[in-house]
Image (tube, rainbow, N blue to C red):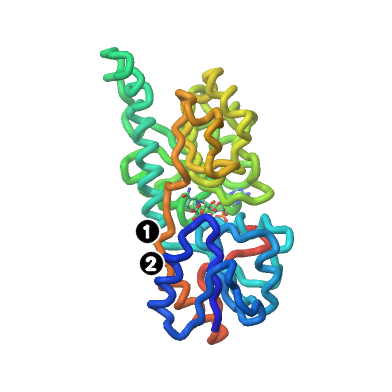
Amino acid sequence: MTILIIATHDRPDWWARELERLAPEADIRVWPDIGNPDEVEYVLAWRPPHGALAALPNLRVVFSLGAGVDHLFSDPDFPAHVTVSRVVDPYLTAGIREYVLLHVLRYHRNQPALDQQQRDRVWDDRARELRQADEQTVGILGLGELGRDSAEALAALEFDVAGWTRSAKDIPGITCFEDRGGLDAMLARSRILVCLLPLTPETEGILNAELFSKLPKGAYLINAARGGHLVEGDLIPALESGRLAHATLDVFRTEPLPADHLFWDHPQITVTPHNAAITDPRSVAKQIVGDIARDRKGELLPNTVDTSLGY
Ligand code: NDP
Ligand code: OXD
């Protein structure tokens, strides 16, 4: 059994070490040293070069090394018959939860303005006028593995939480909206908007001027999903007109974010380097080895992606 690791932006050596430990019988290869392509049945992939997977005629399963699979489906030659499995892992979920809580609390406590006041040596008594958490409305785009967990963590802190999904949901403590018809109502109530959608043709560019205009004036944006969700050219005008107060961005259309990009030093933007959550090979490699054993017994894999939906 041959497993190929194509982790062009990740650390292929971590994955190789874990697989060698967990599956000593397997032949582990690391891109670009693929050997005979006919022998490769399983690939662990993060942003594989376009065409690389199509060149493996006996490929059975591609394991995305992240929760998102847009990096696979953006390949025009992606082999449609292959099973795609993605990461669903408690450490990844915890990373996103921490990121969302950190930045929602930062906005809730008005911290960006306080940071500026400290730089300006201003003691402003109005800073003592804080909302209660149950007066703070948070809207989450996407209530999947990650969005639902973050929504529940915020609700446990008493925030007034709503979420938006493709299919109808009923989640205790969360006000649920669905489909295009439900989006405007969710936006209208969301002072803090968090994006945790997968990147698909339906969600590409969803964070745009029209969407911003439907949020309460002075709303906050947190995008921990994909850079392709944001129409970058719409963000700075929205911030500078006061339509949005501040944005926290973990993901970008071009990563790493180019050194001359305007987002880096904009006072109303917080940039983080796509580190909201990191796939931990110590935990995920074990799941992948288990899934390969399942596949060899002809069983279905638990985290298989619906290729028709693209997530
Ligand atoms: P899931 O597939 O579990 O959940 C996706 C959610 O988005 C579902 O609730 C789904 O609705 C909803 N959704 C999808 N398409 C639409 C649509 N067209 N309209 C409305 N709702 C829609 O994904 P995860 O929660 O596991 O991950 C979400 C994304 O987070 C990943 O795809 C990835 O891009 C990003 N991510 C970022 C990380 C980072 O470090 N910054 C780390 C990990 C992930 P429904 O429930 O009805 O299907
Ligand atoms: C992921 C990511 O999709 O790290 O898991 O962005």
Label 1 sits on a secondary structure element that is helix
Please determine whether, in this image, residue 227 is positioned above or below residue 90.
above
Q: Is the CB of the residue bearing disc 2 within 8 angstroms of ligand 2?
A: no
Depth check: 111 or 65 in front? 65
Crowdedness near tag 2: few (<14), some (14–19) or many (≥20) residues, C-alpha within 10 Å: some
Is residue 128 found left or right of 2 in the rendered image? left
Looking at the figure, which quarter contains the C terminus?
bottom right
Of label 2 and label 1, which has the lower sequence position? 1
Tag 2 near tag 1, CB within 8 Å = yes
Please determine whether, in this image, residue 207 is positioned above or below residue 196.
above
Q: Residue 310's quadrant in the figure?
A: bottom right
Q: Residue 209's quadrant in the figure?
A: top right
Q: Which mark is residue 283?
A: 2
Percent coordinates x, y for residue 288 in the rendering = 47, 72
Percent coordinates x, y for residue 158 in the rendering = 33, 40
Q: Residue at x 42, y 54 (%)?
A: 278
Query: Could you tell me the amino acid type at mark 1?
Result: Tyr
Query: Could you tell me the amino acid type at mark 2?
Result: Ser
Percent coordinates x, y for residue 198 in the rendering = 57, 51
Please name the residue that numbered disc 1 is placed on. Answer: 91
Q: Residue at x 40, y 61 (%)?
A: 280
Percent coordinates x, y for residue 16 in the rendering = 45, 71
